[in-house]
Image (tube, rainbow, N blue to C red):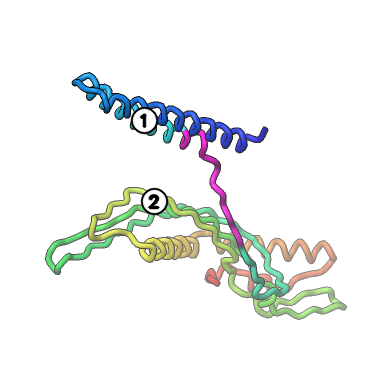
Amino acid sequence: MPKILRLKKFKIILWSIGGFLILILALVAFNAANSKGNSALITVIMLLIGLVLGGIIAFLASKKFGSSAPVISESSHTIAESMRKVFKVVTAEGHFNEIYNYEETTKLFNFIPSKKKALVIVQAKILVGYDFDKFKWEINDELKTVKLLYFPEPEILSTETDYKYYNIEEQFFNLFSKDDLANIQQNGKKQVIEAAKKSHLPQVAADQMKMLLIELLQGKNWQIENPSLISQKELMVK
């Protein structure tokens, strides 16, 4: 027998027994009420207390044994806005931990200061590479050479972030809102990107791309001209 049916059957039996006991107690209470003396009054009171306690116990038991798993309904709709072919190569990966301290102070009635602050650890993985659609070169089939005319700056192709909140302090009249948390995450992400731009990650990406092109062309007995154009330059942000 399925578990839900067993629980349902148990619940019916439990309530039947409880109803039968309540009926018996009601009859005894009615007979005792018609008799005389203090003993009859005490009996009636005790029966009423037992009646209430029995009802409470039956209710709690039915709640415990009769509960079932919640029913969850979910739906989603995915719409593909656009798709296009790209040729982007990741040549460097960096992991960063940024400590972002947020503090805001306001004054209630322009007099009473109210402060809220939070310490956020931003953990980020940044992928840096190049978009080949932005390259410009000339190919000489006779000499088997590729002459670089323009080589773009390395770009941040992907940023994956995770936020951990510590030491959150807020007051009753100055609480964190959804907009506050969104701004904290956005500003924390900007700080990580700025740290990536000042790091050695762009140089690593440029060196890796230069080595990749040289080895790829030499493997086909081709040569590359103006490889010096592949330099660190400035890290671009999409």
Residue at x 23% of width, y 60% of height: 173
Q: Position of residue 146 (x, y in %)?
A: 77, 75
Quadrant assignment for the C terminus:
bottom right
In the rendered image, the vertical position of residue 72 relative to residue 156, given as above or below? above
Number of numbered discs overlaid on the protein picture: 2
Choose between 109 and 193: the one closer to the eye: 109
Residue that label 1 marks: 26
Q: Is 67 a magenta residue?
A: yes
In the image, 109 versus 120, the foreground residue is 109
Q: Which portion, as a residue range, is magenta?
A: 62-75
Q: Is residue 194 above or below residue 120?
A: below
| Residue plotted at (49% across, 60% down) | 199
Q: Identify the image quadrant of residue 12.
A: top right
Q: Residue at x 73, y 79 (%)?
A: 137
Q: In x, y percent, where is residue 162?
A: 49, 54
Helix, strand or loop for the magenta stretch, by majority? loop
Name the amino acid, label 2: Tyr
Marks 2 and 1 sit apart, C-alpha to C-alpha, by: 60 Å
For image coordinates 42% across by 34% down, the residue present is 60
Q: Residue furthest top?
A: 39
Side of 137 relative to 94 (left or right): right
Label 2, on which residue? 165
Q: Quadrant of the N terminus?
A: top right
Frontmost of labels 2 and 1 is 1
In this picture, residue 114 sits left or right of residue 238: left
Find numbered disc 1 in the image and state the secondary structure of the residue it sits on.
helix
Q: Position of residue 62 (x, y in %)?
A: 47, 35
Q: Is residue 171 left or right of residue 195?
A: left
Q: Decide which of 152, 76 is in the foreground and name it.
A: 76
